[in-house]
Image (cartoon, grey):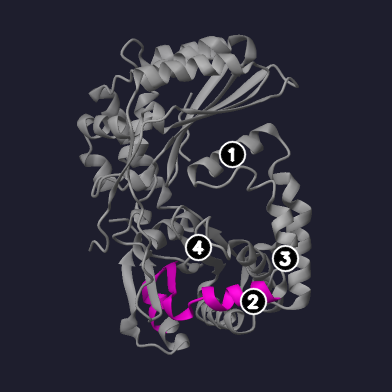
Amino acid sequence: MRTKIILHLFFIQVLSVLPAQAAELFFERDPSLPLVYITAAFHGGATQDPDQRSGTTDLMGRLMLRGTKNKTKSQIDLALDQMGGAIEFETRAEFIAFRGMVLSENLQAYLSLLAEIITSPSFRGKELERLKREQVSQLLDELNQDRSLVRLRFDETFFRGHPYSKPNHGKIKDIQSLGVTDLQKQYQKLITGSNMILLASGDADRSGFEDFLGTISKDRPGSRTLSSIPEFKSPPSKLRVVIFDKPERTQTQVLLGQKGVSFKTPDLDALQIANHAFGGGGFQARLMIELRVKRGWTYGAGSSFKLGSSPHSWKIGFFPKNADTPAAIKEALKMVGDLKQNGITEAEFESAKKSIVNSAGFTFNTPQKRLENRLTEVIFGLPEGYFTGYAERISRISREQVNSALSRFIEPDHMMVGLVATASISRSAVAKELGIPESQVEIQSYQRE
């Protein structure tokens, strides 16, 4: 089975060493189908990649699925096929996960294989070289996907020097330089029993998973040792405009963004209501009404928070044709300023609040969703029930709280505008529309450094 890929220095990273503890288990029985869904997650993700070694964590996990000390990749694939199972690896910014499923009658054989993959990977050099070639090819393919490309290049530029700038799947030049030793060091750091969270649901009993955790804790002892993620400092008070220059674009992918909030920011729930009204509520949101419905500048427009243990980002995205790009950016920036100054209207508040409350139940209406929510709670130190209590928390928030939070949060002068566009077409037009010197519009290659 093919592995799925999902998971100038400004700061000094501090090493955080937590006491050794047992791996955590969360299980929900669901006998509706003869299947078991399993996620073996570990604290630490792409943000734990060493400097100039992006992609280390992702390659480590993917290579673990390609051979153990006793099995080759072909033997692992055959065993999974015979037991009706699958395992995929995912890298995210702050955790990694081996995700899979198996017929319930073959659960113990599956857990035995998964334990072998986790505790005794082979890290064969030849397999790594094949994997690196595949990874580089996939990264080159990503350069053709402008919508995902602008998000990658935005984060790498906006967060430069901070762990959040590290792409989950690495950069080509870093991937090419990685060796087996790099991956083994990352394995020793991340893959320990004390660092592990096991989540499972399906037609099974809890006892089998407890035995599995015992094996992992015995074979992979050790304390949790992770590099802390410092809080990102907002850039200087000056609008930053960066064009990621890509030839022959007829349409522009645009992102406007600023420093965001974390899961533990007190204003988060209020800001989620505001974001839903402004850009997260589809055709009812202010961005869609102004940029698409009224002006026809873009097919889609939206805004969203990216959350983490430290404040990440709030971004606004849309994709106009070249001729409409400068005016669309100017209008979006104007709308951000108005949002800070005046907040959302009573009608927007009531509509957003109702929509969020009515749809909240769909975020935990299956065992798999409930366990994924629990994983997020554990990774980011949230109280149990954080997601099931979301609707109740939202229902208690007033419009005054929302608009007060907006006035504190939005920083128009600290925003960055990132565009995947053809610089020769867009640079002077954007500068003129925004009333800034052309020299203030930075040009970077769309190809990642």
Horizontal and vertical percent position of residue 349: 74, 71
* 296 in the magenta segment: no
First along the sequence among labels 1 and 3 = 3
Residue type at tag 1: Arg
**Going 54% across and 66% down the picture, which residue do you hit?**
317
Q: Label 2 belongs to which residue?
A: 403
Name the magenta segment's main secondary structure.
Answer: helix
Q: Is residue 290 above or below residue 314?
A: below
> Which element type, helix, strand or loop, lies under badge 4?
loop
Q: Label 4 belongs to which residue?
A: 261
Q: What is the span of residues highlighted in magenta in the rendered image?
A: 400-428
> Which element type, helix, strand or loop, lies under badge 1?
helix
> Which element type, helix, strand or loop, lies under badge 2?
helix
Q: Label 3 belongs to which residue?
A: 283
Of marks 3 and 2, the one in the foreground: 2
281 and 352: which one is in front?
352
Figure quadrant of residue 104: top right
Q: Which mark is residue 197?
A: none
Q: Label 1 belongs to which residue?
A: 374
Figure quadrant of residue 139: top left
Horizontal and vertical percent position of residue 140: 36, 47
